[in-house]
Image: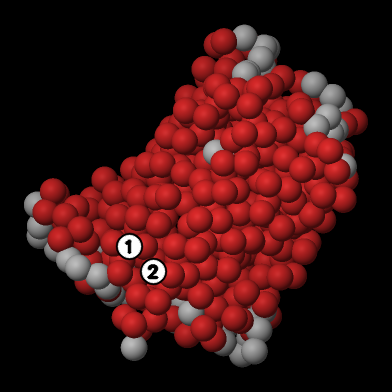
Amino acid sequence: MALSLSDLRSPHRRDPRRWGMLVSAVEGCSFNVWMTAMSGNFLTGLALFLGAGGLVIGVLGSLPALATLLQVVAAPLVAGLERRREFMALLCGIQRMGAPLAGLVALWLGPSPAALALLVAAHLLGWLCMAPAVVVWQGYMSDLVPPEIRGRYFAARYAWGLAVSTAATLTFGAVLDYWQGATGFRILSGIALVAGAANVLLWLLHPQVPQAERRQERPFWEALRVPLARPGVHRRVAGFLAAWAFAQGLAVPFYPMVLLDHLGLSFSAVSWLNTAATLLAAAALRYWGRRQDQVGPGRNVGVLTGMLAAAPLLMVAARYAGWPVLVAAQVLHGVAFNAMTVAQQTLTMELAPTSERAAYFGLFAAASGLTGFLTPVLAGPLADHHWASLFAGAGLASAALSLLWRARIGSALGRQAR
C-alpha cells in the first residue's frame, strides 16, 4: 500500500512520530523552494551573469559533494548529540539565509571577480554547515521513521518536494525570462531568503524524539576507524558509492551549462523540460518506494544505476537527434536520480548499526563525497569544449557499475539479510 501525507494526520495528531514525519515533509518542501533558487540551472545562470566560466561552475557544483565528504570528520563529533532540533535550525539557517543574502550583495556589486568570490564563499560556508547537519538529520530520521515504511515514506516525502520544485522551477523560469538580468536574480534571491526563514521555523516545530544512538567515549581517530575495521558488505557499498559519485560527477553538475550554453535553450525552455522530468519522477517515486519496501533498497540500486548510465549518453545524442532524445534524457535522469536518492539513503540507514550509526554514515558520506567533490572540479575546465566526451565517459562508467553491483554487491547484501 502506498503512503501519503494524509496518512500522517488525524486521528494520530498527538503521536509525536506521525507529527514529526508530517512536519519533516513540509520542511522538505520549503527546502526544495530554496534549493531550486540557489542551485542547478538558476545558480548556474546567476554565476554566468556574474562572469563565471567552467571552473567556477564546477566548484559551485561540487560543494554539496564536499559537504558529503566532510561528514566523515563531523560524524564522531555529533554522535549522540542532544537537542538535535535546535542544532539543525542553527546550521540550516546559516546556509539557507546566508546564500541568498550573498547573492543580493553580489548582484549589487555587479559582474566582477569580487562578486563571484562572495557567491562562492557564501555557498561554501553554507555547505560546510551541512556536513554535521546531514549526519544529525540521518540519525534523527532513522529514529523518527519506522524501518518497515521507510521506502514509502521517503518516496512520498520526495514526491511532494518534487511537486513543489516543479512549481518553483516554472515560476522562477518565467521570472527570469520576464525580468532578465539582475532584477530577475534579485527576485529569486528574495524568495530563497523567505523560504530559508520558513525552513528554520519548521525545524523548531519538529518533536524531540528519543534517539537510539548514545554518545560513546572514544578517541576521535578510533571512532573514525570503527566501520573500516569491521568486515562486512558495508565496505563494498562504500567503494561502490565512491565510484558512482565519480561517474555522476563527470556529467551531472554540467547539465545546466550544456542546456543553456551549448544546446541554446532559454530559461523558460529548461524550466518546462525540468517540469516534465519532475512530474514523471514524482509519479514514479510511488512505485519505487513500494518496490523498495518489498524487495529492499539494494535491488533498486542495481536497476537505477543502469538507468542513470543511459541519461548522459542520450544528452550527447540529443545534439543530433533533437528534442525527443533530449526530453527522454531529462525524464530518465529525473526518475532514476530521485529514486536512487531514496534507495541510497535508506540503504545506508539499513547497513549502519544503531550503536555506531554516525560513524557508518560518515564512512558512506566520505566515500561518495571525495570523488563527488574532486571530479567536477577537475572536469570543470574541460566542460566548456569537451563536454560530450565527459558525458560519454559518465554513461559508460555508470553502466559498468550497474553490472558490478548486480554481480558482486547486490548478492552479498542478500546473503547478509538472510
Quadrant for the C terminus in the image: bottom left
**In the foreground, 120 or 403:** 403
The reply to whether callout 2 and callout 1 are in contact (CB within 8 Å) is yes
Hey, what amino acid is under mark 2? Arg
In the picture, measured across the screen, residue 327 lies left or right of residue 190, that is right
User: What crowding class fits label 1: few (fewer than 14 Cα within 10 Å), some (14-19), or many (20 or more)?
Assistant: some
Picture quadrant where residue 335 is located = bottom right
Quadrant for the N terminus in the image: bottom right
SS for tag 2? Answer: helix
Give the residue displayed 68% in from the left and 51% down from the top.
311
Picture quadrant where residue 413 is located = bottom left
In the picture, measured across the screen, residue 124 lies left or right of residue 82, that is right
Residue 275 can be seen, yes or no? no
- Tag 1 or tag 2, which sits nearer the N-term? 1
In the picture, measured across the screen, residue 337 lies left or right of residue 67, that is right
Residue 94 in percent (x, y) is at: 47, 39
